[in-house]
Amino acid sequence: MRPLLAIIRKDLKLHVGNRRALILTLAVPIAIASFFGSLFGGQSGKTKSSGVPIQITDLDDSTITRKILTNILADASLKATLVPEAEARAAIKQGKTAVAVIFPKNFGADASSSFFSPGAKPELTVLHDPSRNIESSMVQGILMQHIMQAVSQNIFSGTGGRQLAQNALKRLDLGSGLSPADNGALRGLLTNVDQWLSRVAANTNLATTAGRGSGGGAGGGFSLPFKMKDEESEAPAESGIGRYNGYAHSFAGMGMQFVLMAAIDWGLGILLERQRGLWRRLRAAPLSRRTLLLGRASSSTLIALSTLAICWAFSMVVFHVQINGSWLGFFLINLGVSTFAASLGLFIAALGRTPEATRGLAIFVLLMLVMLGGAWIPSFIFPAWLQNVTIFIPTRWAMDGYDAMTWRGLGLSAALAPAAVLFAATALCGWFAHRCFRWEAD
Amino acid sequence: MSSPLLEIRQLRKTYGSLAAVDGVSFTVQRGECLGLLGPNGAGKTTTLSMLAGLLTPDSGQVLIDGRALAGDTDPLKRQLGLVPQELALYEDLTAAENLAFFGALYSLEKATLHQRMADALAIVGLADRARDKARTFSGGMKRRLNLAAALLHDPQLLLLDEPTVGVDPQSRNAIFDNIEALRARGKTILYTTHYMEEVERLCDRVVIVDHGKVIADDTIAALRARAGSGGNLLKITLAQAPAGAWLPALRQLAGIRSAELAGALLSLELDDLTASASPILHFLREHHETIVHLSSDRPNLESIFLTLTGRQLRDT
Ligand SMILES: Nc1ncnc2c1ncn2[C@@H]1O[C@H](COP(=O)(O)OP(=O)(O)OP(=O)(O)O)[C@@H](O)[C@H]1O
Ligand SMILES: [Mg+2]
C-alpha cells in the first residue's frame, strides 16, 4: 500500500509542480468550451436569438406588400431592413446578409388574382448566400406564412375580395376549358364567396361574431391552422424539463477532450520514464507490475477528476450550467471518463516502443475518439450509419451520458449504461496494457 | 569461507543474432568490491539487469545469498541496490523528495526513511542541497544523488553501473570517496565501468568482459603477473635528444627488458626498479646526459587488456 500511495503522491506532486502545464490544461479547455458553447446556442432563455438578417426591396408598394412588410418587421425570428434593390443584391454578394427578398411591381394585385384563377403568378425573388442554405429555407417558410396571411386577408375582406370573385366569374363566362360540371361547381363557389363578402361588408356585427367563432376566419384572412408553443423557452426551470444549454455540451466535450489529451501525455510520460532509466529503479524495487500500473492509473484518474471538476465548476458559476439529472449519475460519468482516460494512457504506453514513435498514433486515436464521440459536433448530426458505428466508441456514451445528466435532466438510470461502458473500456485498456507493456525494454 | 553473496552461472541473453551476454559466470564475496570491466557494448548493463531481476535471462542462474529471485515482489530484492547507468531521477522533485519516493517503494517506515535519507545525503555530501530540485544540480551532484537513491533500503550488495560516467575529475573523486565510505560500512560492491584506473583504485578483484564473454577473472595483482610483467616502467626525460649512439650498450645492462628512445624521452621496462635504477643513472652520467625529469609506474590494466585481447580498450 505504501509504495502505491508513494507513486500516486509523486505523480500528483509532479503534476501540481508544473504550474505552466497545469494552467494550460485548465485554461485552454475552459476557453475553448466557452467559445463553442456560445456558438451552439449558449444558455437558452438568457440570450434571445437575434434573428436571421434579411434585406427586403418592395418595388410594388401596395397595401398588400406594406401589410406583409409590417408583419415581417414585427417578426422576432427575422431581423429585416428595407433597402433598394441594388443594395440588397450587393449585400448578398458581400455576405453581409443571409437572405434578400424582392417584391416585384404589382405583386399584391397579381398574387390576389391568381388566387382563384390559373395563369401567370407573380414571381418573388429570393436571393441567398450559398453558404447559408439553412437560414434561407427558414426565411422562405416564414415569408410564406406572412404572404399567405396578407393575401388571403385581402381576398376575404370587403370590396377587394368581391372584385376578385366577380372578375373570376367573368373569366369563367369567357370559357375556362373545364367540363360543364366542374365549371358549374366553381361558378357556385365563386357566387357564394361574392354573396358572403357582400354580407360581411353590410354587417360588421356578423363579421365580428364569425371572427370569434371561427378563430379569426372572415376578417383576418388565412392563418396557420395551428399555433406553435415554444416549450423550450416557455417551460419554467422547475418544470422538470431540461433547458438546453450549449455550454453543458461544450464543457462536456472539451473537458473530455483535454482529459484524453492528458492521457497521451501520461502514456508518453511512462515511455519517457522508461527511456530515462526510472523504470529500472521502479522495477528493481520489490513491487508487482500491477502495483506500478495501478499507481499510475490512480494518479491519472485523480488528476482527470480534478480537471473535470474545475471545468464543470467554472461552467456552473459562469454559464449557469445545471445538473438537472442525477448528481450521482453525473459523478459516475465523470469517474468513468477519468478512469478511461487513465487506462488509455497505459494503453498508449503499451502500444509504443519510444515516445517519438508513439505520439502520432496516439494523437490519431485521440482525435477519432473525440470526433466520433460527438465532443466537437453533437452526434445527432452524424448520418445514421455513423451513429450506429459510434455505439462502439466509449466517448460517444460519455457524451450522451453528460447530456442526459445535464440539460436533459434524466435520472440516474440514464447514466448507468454510459458509466458501465466507460468502466468496461477502462478494464479492457488496462488489461491490454498489463499484458502488452514492454516491461523488459529500455 | 562463507557462501558468496552473489553467484551467477552461465548467464546468457541474446537479442536476435547478437549474444549480448554469452555464458557469463562469476561470484562476489561478502564485503568485496568487484570490478566488472569491459568496453562499450560488452554486456555489462545487460548482466546487471539480469542480476537485478529486470531482465529474464535466456538461460543461466543468478543466486543472491544462495537463492534465486522468485518474481517481481521477492523480498530478496531488498538485498540489492541498483544504481542505473542513466540519471534515474525526477528532475522536478527536490533531492529529498526523490529519495523519499524511492525509499517508499521499499515500504520503509516514516522514521526509518527519514533516518536513511539523512544518512544517504550525508554519504554523498548533498545534505545541504536536500531541498533543491534535482534539475538545479550539476552533473556530478546528480550522479551522487543517483547513488544515494539506491542506498535508502540499506542493501547488502550495490550494483553500480558506470557511476562516474560523464563527470569531471573532481566529482569523480568525490564519488570514489563515497564508494570507499560505503565499503567501510561493509557493503559489497559490484562496480561496472570501462575505466581501468577506477577498478585499480577501488576494487580487489576484476572480471573483464568483452563481447558478452568473461575474458579474465582474477585479483588485480594476479592479473598484473599474468600480463607477464610484474616489473616496472621507467620514463626519463633528458635535457636534449642524445647525440651519441649509446642505446644498444644500455640495453646490455642487467635487468633491462626493453629500452626505447623517442627524441629526448627514454622509456625502459625493468625487472626490478630497485636493482636497476642506480646502474642506469650511472650509465647516463658516464655518457654526459643531463636528466630533467624521471618517473616510474607499474603496468596498468590497459596493457593487460591489450595482452588479453590484442585490442586497445576503447575509452569513451
Ligand atoms: N534491448 C536491446 N535490444 C537489442 N540489443 C540490445 C538491447 N540491450 C542491449 N543490447 C545490445 O547488447 C549489447 C550489450 O549491451 P549492454 O548495454 O549490456 O553493454 P554495456 O557493456 O553496458 O555497454 P556500455 O558500456 O556502453 O554501457 C550491445 O551490443 C547492445 O547493443
Ligand atoms: Mg552499460
Image (tube, rainbow, N blue to C red):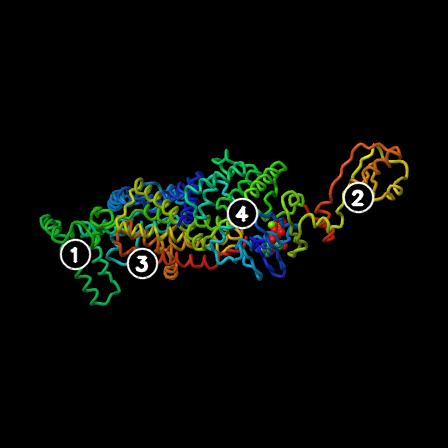
The chain holding disc 3 is A
Per the image, label 3 sits on a secondary structure element best described as helix
Task: Give the image location of residue A59, x and y in percent.
Answer: 32, 44
Kindly identify which numbered label has been placed on residue B270.
Answer: 2
Instruction: Report how far apart the C-alphas of labels 4 and 1 lie in the structure.
Output: 93 Å
Chain for disc number 2: B
Instruction: Tell me the residue that label 3 is attached to.
Output: A417
User: Quick one: label 3, few (<14), some, or many (20+) residues within 10 Å?
Assistant: some
Under mark 3, the amino acid is Ala
Q: CA distance from mark 2 to mark 1?
A: 140 Å
Q: Is residue B118 left or right of residue B30?
A: left
Horizontal side of B253 relative to A355 (left or right) equals right
Query: How many C-alpha atoms fall within 10 Å of the one at disc 2: few (<14), some, or many (≥20)?
Result: many
CB under 8 Å between discs 2 and 1: no
Amino acid under disc 2? Leu
Dot 3 and dot 4 within a common chain: yes
